[in-house]
Image (spheres, rainbow, N blue to C red):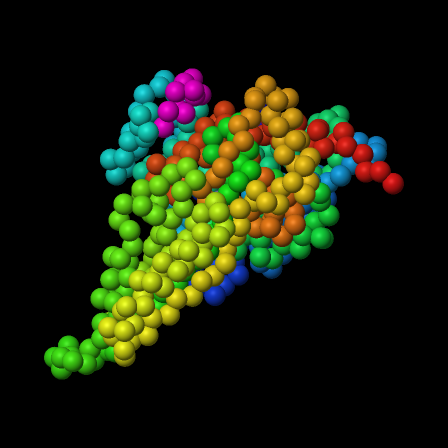
Amino acid sequence: MSDVLERFLRYVRIDTQAQEGTGLVPSTLKQLDLCRLLADECRALGLRDVVMSPQGTVLATVPATVPHRAPAFALVAHVDTEPGTSGKDVQPQVHRNYLGGDLPLPKGGLVLKVEDNPELLGLVGGTIITTDGTTLLGADDKAGVAAIMAMAAHLMQHPEIPHGPVKLCFTCDEEIGHGVDHLDIPALGVVCAYTLDGDGRGKIDCETFSADQAIITVTGVGIHPSIGKGKLVNAIRILSRIIAGLPQDRLSPETTDGRDGFVHPYMIEGGTASATARFILRDFETARLAEYAALLESLAEPLRSEYPTCQIEIQIVKQYRNMRDGLPQEPRALKKAVDAFRAIGIEPEQTIIRGGTDGSRLTEMGLPTPNLSTGEHNPHSPLEWTSEEELETAVAMLVELARAWGREVISG
Ligand SMILES: [Zn+2]
C-alpha cells in the first residue's frame, strides 16, 4: 500500500476553491497554499527541477532510472475545487471496513445511497471517504494530486523500478477553464501527458465535450419605480425571458446524458439597470456549439425589437475542444495507458466524459492528454466520495505506466 490516503486527507483539508471574475491569477490566492505544500513535498521526496510559477503551476521531475534515453511523459492534476460548492473546512469522513449499505453523512441529513452509487457494491470491506455533508470533498481533483504524489514517492523509494523521466504538473483554476493557460508545453519536453481527473477506476477518457461559454448582458433603463411608467426598462425581466425561452425538455444537463449536448445557465447577477447571465454550451460535436449560440441569439433578437432602448449583448468565449481529434498524434499515449491497466489486472474501459479536463485543452494545443480514472464520484457535490482502493489502483496503474514508458527508447 502507498501513502495515497494519508496524502489525500491532507490535501482536501486545504481550501482551494476557485472563483470566477476576481481578476487574479490564480483566481484565489488560497490555491497557492496547496501549491506551496506540493512543491515542498516534491523537494522533500528528492524530485528534480521543482518549480512553482507565480501563477501557481508546480512542476517537478521524477528522474529516470533506466540507462537508455526514454521519452518523458507528464502527469497532470488540478489543485482547485469548483466555485459552486464550499471547499472550506472540509472534514473528510473515513468509513473503514465498509459493510455495504447506505452511508448517512453526519450533518445536513444527506445520505450516500447505494441505489445512486452502485460502485459502492464493489467496495464492501474497503475504505470509503465522504464529506460531513456541508462541503464538497475535493476528490476532484485532489484524488489525482494524491495519486501522482504517491506514485512519485513510490518510484523514489524503489529505484529498482525501471522507468524514464516522469514530469509532474499541478495546475490552478481548472474548474474555471484556466488550468493550462500558463503552461509552457514545449518547455515541458514530453511526448504526451495524462490528466488524473477521472471517475471510478479502470477508465480512460478519450473523448470530452467541446465547450464554449456564453455571457449575456442586458442593459436596461433604471429609474425610480415611482416614476417608472413608460420609462423603466427592467434588465432582470428581459434576461429572465431569454432564459425562460430555452427548451424545457431537452438541451439541459437535467434532461440529457450520453452524447447529447446542452445550453446551461449557471450564474445570474445584476439589477434593474443591468443584468448578466453566464451559460455553458457543451457538445461532443464542435459544430453544434455555433447552433447553441445561434439559439441564444434567436431568443434575444425579438426582445431587442420589443425594447429598443435596451441592449442585449451576447459574448461567446471559446473554452476547450473534444480531445478525440488530437489523441492520434501520439498513438502510444492511449496504448501505454491500456498496457498499464492490464499490468495490474484491469481491462480498461475507454470512455467519454461529459465535461472537459485540462487534457482537452492540452490535446488541442498539440499535447495528446487522455484522462485517467482516479476514484472520483459525484464531483461538485456534498455527496462527493472516493475510496482508498480506487486511489491505490490509480497509484499502481501510474507505476506501471512509468514502467511501460521506460521500455521505449528514443532513437538517434
Ligand atoms: Zn477536475
Q: Position of residue 162 (x, y in %)?
A: 75, 28
> Which quadrant does the N terminus fall into?
top right
Residue 51: percent from the left, percent from the top?
66, 51
Rendered view: 127 above or below 330: above
Q: Does the rendering let one see residue 71?
A: yes
Q: Residue at x 62, y 45 (%)?
A: 326
Residue toward you, 329 or 399: 329
Q: Relative to 56, is 368 above or below?
A: above
Provide residue 363's location: percent of width, then percent of height.
61, 47
Q: Nearer the viewer, residue 252 or 18?
A: 252
Main secondary structure along the magenta-highlighted residues = helix
Which residue is painted at 51% across and 33% down in the image?
Answer: 351
| Residue at 56% over, 22% down | 347
Q: Which residues are magenta?
A: 117-126
| Left or right of 6 in this view: 86 | left
Q: Is residue 278 left or right of residue 155?
A: left
